Amino acid sequence: MNSGVKVFAPASVANVACGFDILGFAIDKPGDEIIARFNNSISGLQISKITGAKGKLPYAIEKNTAGVAAQSLLEHIGEAERGIEIEIHKKMPFGSGLGSSAASAAAAVMAINELLRRPLSKRELLPFAVIGEQCADGSYHADNVAPSLLGGIQLIRHNPSLDVHRLPVPKGLYASVVYPHVQILTKDARDVLSDVVTLEQCIQQTGNIAALVVALYNGDLDLLQRALEDVIVEPQRSKLIPHFAEVKDAALNQGALGCSISGAGPSIFALSQNSLVAENVGIAMQNIFQAAKIESQLFISPINQEGTILC
């Protein structure tokens, strides 16, 4: 048995207001770590250790997000019988809307690929990481996995074919993300959504996502500010997050370009033009929860451009 390799996969913000299920970006922290090593005394993949999960994660490969992702990769490259063990070190909260399962899946495939001396490119690992996250929420979508694995702001034109494209990041862009300690299940966050969208909403939302892409390419923060509006999902999901309206108002009053729900929630993100504004925005957002006696965590970060990395 050798020392193996260790990788880190960062948290991610999915949807980014108007980009429901098609847009996401990575932040520097929190994130998950995976250690992978050869073990000649076993056959196949095993999970040898899990920390930080408080007993919530199974050791069974077929029931674990990281396990499913790693196993699917090993089967693809013909190494399914190779004796490999992995350790999962959860360093981010469950059910936070920050892509916890996506980070585990991304870290797992990267660790296996590094251990086996990179038979695939980083981009080629994406389908296996998405399969892993699918184990957690039942949906095949890459708006968390793609940024967690590849970094940056990722646009998914078509989830089934993983037609994924990296978008440019304007200089100085920072994210403030507040995770209030309230529970919102992804299933509940999806169940609350209506499958009926008016023509007016469709026109406004598609205009916003198109403008957001233009703003990122041109570095036009004024246009980005106008584009960061979700007229379909946020109005329905925000009712699940205590004090969402007050938090959003606090962020905008401090100069945020936009503010919305991170993934399925309950985390709330805001984008700002620089780190100083982002700090003021984050503190103002967190103060709303503090006044309501709701514990929360604040993460301030530039857009993470690296994604999953070898430690």
Image (tube, rainbow, N blue to C red):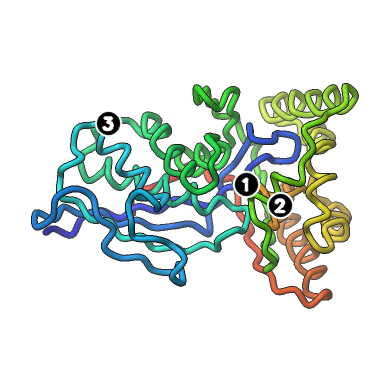
| Residue sitting at x 43%, y 38% | 131
Q: Residue furthest left?
A: 40
Q: Is residue 114 left or right of residue 185?
A: left
Residues under labels 3 and 1: Cα distance? 29 Å
Q: Residue at x 45, y 41 (%)?
A: 149
What x and y, as percent, mark residue 45? 23, 50
Q: Disc 3 designates what residue?
A: 76
User: What is the x, y in percent for residue 83?
Assistant: 15, 50
Q: Quadrant of residue 96?
A: bottom right
The structure residue drawn at horizontal position 26% and vertical position 43%, both measured from the top left corner, is 114
Of the two numbered discs 2 and 1 on the same chain, state the one appearing first in sequence. Answer: 1
Secondary structure beneath label 3: helix
Judge whether 91 appears above or below 159 on screen: below
Residue at label 1? 13
Kindly identify which residue carries mark 2. Answer: 269
Contact between marks 2 and 1 (CB within 8 A): the answer is yes
Q: Is residue 43 left or right of residue 233?
A: left
Going from N to C along the chain, the mark reached first, 2 or 3, is 3
Under mark 2, the amino acid is: Phe
The residues tagged by marks 2 and 1 sit, at their Cα atoms, a distance apart of 8 Å
Q: Position of residue 192 (x, y in %)?
A: 76, 46
Residue 26 in the image, given as x and y percentages of width and height: 56, 45
> Could you tell me which residue is drawn at 36 percent across and 65 percent down?
50
